[in-house]
Image (cartoon, rainbow, N blue to C red):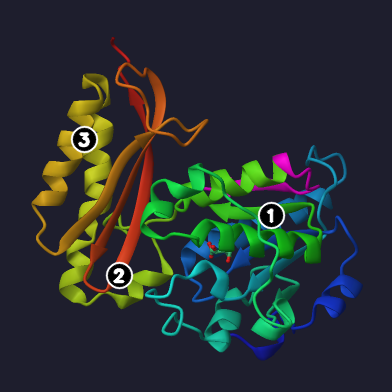
Amino acid sequence: MPAASDRPEVITSIAALRERFPAGTVALVPTMGALHEGHLALVDRAAALVRAGATPGSTTPTPAPSAVVVSIFVNPLQFGPNEDLARYPRDLDADLDLLAGHGVTAVFHPDVDEMYPGGPSQTRVTAGDVGALWEGRSRPGHFDGMLTVVAKLLGIARPAVALFGQKDAQQLFLVQRMVRELDIATRIEGVTTVRAGDGLALSSRNRYLDPNERIAARALSAALEAAGSAGDRGIDAVIAAAQSVLMGEELVELDYLGIVDPATFRPVADDFRGPARVLIAAKVGPARLIDNADIYLNRAA
Ligand code: PAF
């Protein structure tokens, strides 16, 4: 059990956060809490950037952050009416215990009134047509809500760098595009997905799975592996390889399986050759899970 003194300080107001951390000094890890080892990988990378910035002669990109801030805010704007907003796991004490000893200076934990005084903001960032593909097709409005809160968090913390997991590949793509298109002075860094020993990508929603569903959920990463092995045989072979793994698992209900050009996040053309990304979303019992992997298409073509 970590000592209370190892836990990061908790800041709940926007004014206090801004006063404590001048612009350009923070490495921000935006989260909705229910933290796990995947989040710790983001935090550890953020702490490494802070350490590197403090090392004389280091070649860290400028400006180098001097503090790690983790935001914990379950953002109502990014949940649809039939989604899991009410039951989304919230346990601040457990989150603070997990963060203890990982070099986090502060946790920013505003309530909904602090973030959206007077109700949901009227001004929204729109994710455009890519925001309506893949996750966006199953979760209309999700990416507009996500981008809106990320824009707010970047405006509040004014971080030098913000870190996002590659498991949410479409989210990472859209945040990178938003920062570029809206000239936001924060560098966005993607961090490799952390997996359980059997391949399942870590996710806060994994805790909804019962033991049988947890075993079945391995099919997502197994399907990605099968897809990767079929890359040289082209798109149809990739889809068939992934589908045959997913169809062998009756507790897995596939939502979508797609192959995108990482530069556009749109489906690749039939003759596409080069690095691509395979996306999977599926319901396993009560949990909606997503995963993705890089593959190389048609190397031998
Ligand atoms: O990935 C998440 O946890 C959320 O979408 C984020 C980026 C914290 C915005 O609410």
Q: Which labelled disc corresponds to residue 239?
A: 3
The residue identified by callout 1 is 162
Disc 2 element = strand
What residue sits 40% from the left and 77% below the top? 84
Please state which amino acid type lies under the numbered disc 1.
Ala
Task: Say if residue 111 shows up in the picture.
Answer: no
**Is the residue 127 above or below the residue 217 in the image?**
above
What residue sits 85% from the left and 46% below the top? 63
Q: Which labelled disc corresponds to residue 287?
A: 2
Quarter the N terminus occupies: bottom right
- Relative image position of residue 266 (x, y in whole percent): 43, 34
Please state which amino acid type lies under the numbered disc 3.
Ile
Quarter the C terminus occupies: top left
Disc 3 element = helix
Relative placement, left or right, of 15 versus 212 is right
Relative placement, left or right, of 10 versus 98 is right
Furthest toward the front, the residue is 122
Between the residue at mark 1 and the residue at mark 2, the CA separation in whole angstroms equals: 27 Å
- Relative image position of residue 31 (x, y in whole percent): 58, 68
Which quadrant holds residue 26? Answer: bottom right
**Mark 3 or mark 1: whose residue is earlier in sequence:** 1
